[in-house]
Amino acid sequence: MKAFVLACAAAIVIASAGVVVLNGLQEPVQQAFSTSAVRL
């Protein structure tokens, strides 16, 4: 039971770290898909 609780806690920590990292890497759609010929 202790190993299961530790595995759940580790999964939550890893998922939280992933959310923080991926939110930091995202760029707004206006920047990602804009070119000189596009008006948004």
Image (cartoon, grey):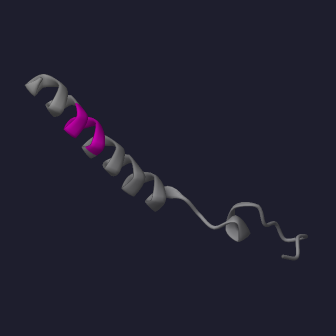
21 displayed left or right of 35: left
Q: Position of residue 9 (x, y in %)?
A: 20, 39
Q: Which residues, given as a range, are shown in magenta?
A: 8-12
Counting from the top left corner in percent of width and height, residue 8 is at 24, 34
Identity of the residue drawn at 88% across and 76% down: 39
Magenta: main secondary structure equals: helix
Q: Is residue 39 above or below residue 22?
A: below
Q: In which quadrant is the C terminus drawn?
A: bottom right
Residue toward you, 4 or 30? 4
Quarter of the image for the N terminus: give it. top left
Direction left: furthest residue:
2
**5, 23: nearer the viewer:** 5
Q: Is residue 10 magenta?
A: yes
Question: Can you tell which quarter of the image residue 38 is in?
Answer: bottom right
Residue 6, above or below 34: above
Residue 6 forms part of the magenta stretch: no
Q: Residue 19: percent from the left, percent from the top?
A: 41, 52
Query: In the displayed structure, would residue 3 be above or below residue 40?
Result: above
Q: Residue at x 18, y 25 (%)?
A: 4
Q: Is residue 5 left or right of residue 32?
A: left
Q: Is residue 34 left or right of residue 29?
A: right
Location of residue 32 with respect to 13 vertically, above or below: below
Q: Nearer the viewer, residue 2 or 28?
A: 2
Image x and y of residue 7, in percent: 21, 29
Residue at position x 78%, y 66% from top?
34
